[in-house]
């Protein structure tokens, strides 16, 4: 059996809907990887000024945040521990991006992306309509990837689905 025949047996057919999910998955993956690697580069290049600037931004967001539980979290937990939180978020962004890029555990990656977007929305969505809007758009796109088996279109989830058909992760 040739590689193309194997690929055709494993992958979902490239219908317009499947191609749309694939393109959205790849664009969202790029956005996550770009954001996460940018943070990691800043952390490695100039950690103290970078952490300080973001801690100041978190403090400013807390003063005008309309959600009291988020204000409390930003002020009392995140700002004092900004380096740890920023590093964890950067790593999570890269992991979500890689999951979506490779189509590997796409539903879990999309759920991780939704969690990050909800956190970003609650922390900074009140700062501008574009900040709120992009997070809501990404949440919607990632929900679509979870509902439609987004990783089965030119992704490693297709291989896993073929081998483990009863597992709902792919």
Image: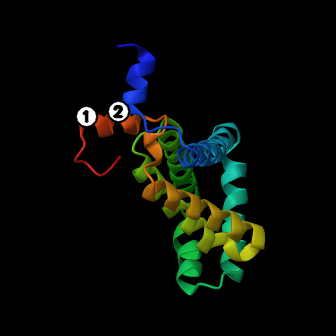
Give neighbour class at mark 2: few <14, some 14-19, many 20+ (Cα, 10 Å): some
| 134 horizontally vs 98: left or right | right
| 49 horizontally vs 162: left or right | right
Residue 54: x and y in percent read 69, 59
Name the residue tied to disc 1. 163
Q: Nearer the viewer, residue 6 or 116?
A: 6
Residue located at (73% from left, 58% from top): 53
- Residue furthest out toward the top: 2
State the mark number for residue 67. Answer: none
Residue located at (57% from left, 86% from top): 68
Could you say whether the residue bearing mark 2 is in a helix, strand or loop? Answer: helix
> Is residue 145 among what the camera can see?
yes
Q: Is residue 2 above or below residue 29?
A: above
Could you say whether the residue bearing mark 1 is in a helix, strand or loop? Answer: helix
CB atoms at circles 1 and 2 under 8 Å apart?
yes
Residue 131: x and y in percent read 72, 67
Quadrant of res 159: top left
Residue located at (43% from left, 41% from top): 152
Q: Is residue 75 above or below residue 162?
A: below
Name the residue tied to disc 2. 159
Question: CA–CA distance between discs 1 and 2?
Answer: 6 Å
How many numbered marks, from 0 up? Answer: 2
Q: Quadrant of the N terminus?
A: top left
């Amino acid at each position: 059996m040739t590689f193309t025949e194997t690929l055709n047996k494993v992958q979902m057919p490239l219908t317009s809907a499947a191609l749309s999910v694939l393109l959205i998955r790849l664009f969202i993956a790029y956005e996550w990887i770009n954001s996460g690697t940018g943070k990691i580069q800043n952390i490695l290049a100039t950690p103290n000024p970078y952490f300080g600037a973001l801690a100041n931004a978190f403090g400013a967001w807390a003063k005008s945040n309309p959600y009291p539980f988020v204000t409390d979290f930003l002020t009392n937990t995140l700002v004092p521990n900004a380096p740890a939180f920023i590093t964890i978020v950067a790593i999570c962004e890269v992991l979500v991006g890689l999951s979506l890029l490779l189509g590997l555990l796409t539903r879990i990656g999309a759920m991780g992306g939704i969690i990050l977007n909800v956190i970003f929305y609650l922390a900074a969505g009140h700062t501008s309509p574009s900040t709120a809007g992009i997070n809501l758009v990404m949440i919607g796109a990632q929900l679509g990837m979870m509902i439609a088996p987004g990783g089965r279109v030119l992704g490693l989830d297709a291989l896993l689905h073929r081998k483990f058909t009863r597992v709902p992760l792919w």
